[in-house]
Amino acid sequence: MPRVSDYSALLYYLDGDHFRWNAPADLGTQAIITYSFTETGSLADPAVSDPYGATEYWSFDEDQRDIFREGLSLYEDISGVRFIEVDERGMINAFGTTGSSAGGWANIAMSGNGFTGRGDLTVDTDVMTKGTYGYVTVLHEIGHALGLQHSHDGGLTLNHHADTPANTVMTYNHSPAYVTDLGTFDVQAMQHLYGSSDSFAGWEIFGGGSDPIIIRSTNASETVIGTDQNTTINAKGGHDHVQGREADDTLRGADGRDTMIGGLGEDRLFGGNGADLLIGGTTGDAYSGGSDNDVLYGNRGHDMLHGGSGNDHLLGGVGRDTLVGGDGSDTLTGGTGADTFVFDQSDAFDTNRITDFGRGADVIDLSGVWLTRLEQLDISEDNGTTTISYSNWFELELTNYSDPLTGSDFIFS
């Protein structure tokens, strides 16, 4: 087991990139993390669920909650994380235990394209004041919940001379006294994972409790990742990368060329004035979903809209837009401009609709379904709607369109 003398020994993500809250983005990207205090009525049966044999679960009282919030603030002060307390279950959910063989335990930070963990964090003592073992345990378990591992475990471990509480609260060495602050390596590891504490400079973050969360970034080009709760993200400007998680999110672009990814909920994506890329569900990942019904608005600019796998509604807006419905029965509205409507193998056995075909020299791209000429299609018109089909495998309705179609209306393979 390799031994090191730096913060790399504390990084869980070295054993799997999903062991961090910002895994959908690059290392060093700031993260907004929800947490809750699990109330007594919602606590599980420890005899069934506790990994360390606890005999009782209990909810923190107000003093213990304040101590826990103070521990969170220490991590906020030194890195690019912000915590929002919510009423329902969040990404971190804290409560106490009695009789555990461990002083506490926490599920490790976990996220990726299309999934966000919701883990528990426990402390096995009701004495959590500064200078006690309980306070160190609070800091230690928060570290786990953010993606830090024990200094003596994992693929890398700290050298004995470096495995001290002055370097990290993730150590099991508490001599000569219980620390009341984070160590040098904790700070370095957290900044490696989530950036510096000034990552949120100029941002506005509202909500929490039972209310949706609102995030407003700055005019710079930034990456903004939502939370596990219903979140509205307003990107003010720049070339932003904006991504939702698993809740029902509203993502709004501004003047730059933005990339906006909805995630797993029933999302609403609004492009700004630039040439934006809007994606209703996550793609290209083993955990990808996008199975809910999204609404994507291109607004101005030459936008690219991808619906994902739900029954989505894509609206291109002003400009030459490219609309890709994806799996599911989708409704596509190009808006003004010469738009391209793309269909491929994921549209098999679905009925898709284009509501405004022909308004601006639009074309239907069927190159992804391996069709080569117009004669392969069955085209019929009834009561103002034109239906295009290929056997029973592909069907597309052009509502309010009855003009004849020619080969120039299509792109074939």
Image (tube, rainbow, N blue to C red):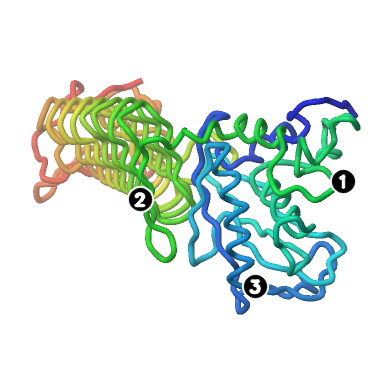
- Report if residue 351 is visible in the image: no
Horizontal side of 178 relative to 118 (left or right) equals right
Q: Name the residue rendered at 54%, 58% in the picture.
A: 90
* Label 1 vs label 3, nearer the camera: 1
On the image, the x and y values in percent for residue 304 come to 30, 29
Q: Name the residue rendered at 77%, 58% in the picture.
A: 132
On the image, the x and y values in percent for residue 4 come to 83, 25
Q: Considering the numbered disc 2 on the image, is that residue within a helix, a strand or a loop?
A: strand
Above/below status of 139 relative to 63 = above
Q: Considering the numbered disc 3 on the image, is that residue within a helix, a strand or a loop?
A: loop
Q: Which residue in the protein does label 3 denote?
A: 59
User: Could you say which disc has been placed on residue 214 in the image?
Assistant: 2
User: Could you say which disc has been placed on residue 176 in the image?
Assistant: 1
Q: Considering the numbered disc 1 on the image, is that residue within a helix, a strand or a loop?
A: loop
Q: Name the residue rendered at 23%, 34% in the picture.
A: 272
Work out whether residue 28 or residue 202 is closer to the camera in this orientation and state it. Answer: 202
**Quadrant housing residue 102:** bottom right
Q: What amino acid does circle 2 point to?
A: Ile
